[in-house]
Image: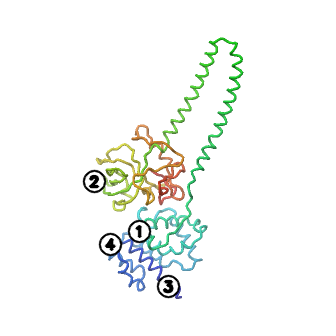
Amino acid sequence: MATNGNSDLKRKQGIVSSLCKHFSLDPEAFSSEVSGNDIKTLFSKFLKSSGKESPKNNDEVMKWIGFAESFPKNSKAWYGVLNELNADLAQKSVLLGNGFTPSEADVIVFSAIHSSVIGLSNSEKEKLPHVTRWMDYIQNTEDLGALFEKILLEKPDFEPQIWLQRAKAAAKPEVDSDAKKTVQNTKTVDKSEAELNAKKSDSRKKSKGDKETVQEKKKAPETEATNKDKELSVSLLNIQVGLICKAWKHPSADSLLVEEIDVGEAKLRQVVSGLAKYCSPEELTNRRVVLITNVKPGKLRDVMSEGLVLCASNEDHTIVEPLLPPESAKPGERVLFSGIDGKPEDVLNPKKKQLEKITPHLFTDEKGVATFKCIPFMTSAGPCTSSIPKASIK
């Protein structure tokens, strides 16, 4: 029984510490109250000390606090509860909120189950993909590294050589075919040379002219295909890492927000985004994003916009969030795609509908990694991600 009591106290202390960090409060002020109060009582004290009102979904918060307090101490029992939590997280990014910023409930439940999840084997973690994805998102978004040991997940490494091998394999039949044609053409030329020695010069000229005509006809479709591939290449887009320095509501459109974004230039870029429904200006401030910086500048409801913030969205567009580059990615660095080279357009031409042709190939994979035709969005610090798996990106 003493062991269970110590376990309860340790869990409660972890929850109190993480809530203090979430509310920017001094944990020392609550250290004497931990043992004598339950989490619901402590939560009310946190709200009062932070000057915040009870959340509108307070009943839901209380439900998740009850979940945290009653989380099993027995390892055989807790795996079944984690399975239920995994099912609950399958269709959402966070437990409560707008799908973008973790709520108090997320912080509390994370703290309560952390010791259980970190003790799971890799095979057990693989069976709880939504729980582990959510835990990874919370520990990074809330910056809880000083309070809890980081949960390490086995994320698939992107191997560029695989894509190169596939490309070579796809190109090999064409190379072999061209080689056969070359051999056949050589034989024909050798045979023709003997015959042409006995013919008049005008016949030779006619043969040469015919060959040139055939070659020109062959080049035409090849050039057409090359231009088509180039037009669909993601390399046309100048996709860069940005840091939102300031955000505010659009003065004349409720659905729009305006952001000033650092992309490594002398001047901040002003961008208008349709994110007002999904996050507040405060949530965007000091957040890293991924944006296209070579779209044609233009006004949206009389406010100039000089870029396009790329966002992930679930199927019914009820959850939308900007892609997230790694924390150590530098503002202004270009996002690259392994095996795809090319210089971006100075400014995209709206008449060519380049964006419309490329964005249908942008998705997050089952791990939430942003991709173009299954090739990850890569920065110097790693891939860009989203908490929404298998999402469309626009």
Q: Residue at x 47, y 79 (%)?
A: 11
Q: Which mark is residue 172?
A: none
Q: Considering the numbered disc 2 on the image, is that residue within a helix, a strand or a loop?
A: loop
Question: Gap between marks 4 and 2, in whole Å?
Answer: 27 Å
Are the two marked residues, 2 and 1, in contact with CB atoms closer than 8 angstroms?
A: no
Q: Considering the numbered disc 3 on the image, is that residue within a helix, a strand or a loop?
A: helix
Residue 310, given in percent of the width and then of the height, sits at 42, 52
Q: Residue at x 53, y 32 (%)?
A: 223
Label 4 or label 1, whichever comes before in sequence order = 4
Q: What residue type is labelled 4?
A: Glu
Residue beneath disc 1? 103
Q: Which mark is residue 6?
A: 3
Residue beneath disc 4? 53
Label 2 or label 3, whichever comes before in sequence order = 3
Question: Gap between marks 4 and 1, in whole Å?
Answer: 14 Å
Question: Gap between marks 2 and 3, in whole Å?
Answer: 54 Å
Q: Which amino acid does label 3 sit on?
A: Asn
Does residue 99 sit above or below 300 in this rendering? below
Does residue 169 sit above or below 87 in this rendering? above
Residue beneath disc 2? 251
Question: Gap between marks 3 and 1, in whole Å?
Answer: 27 Å
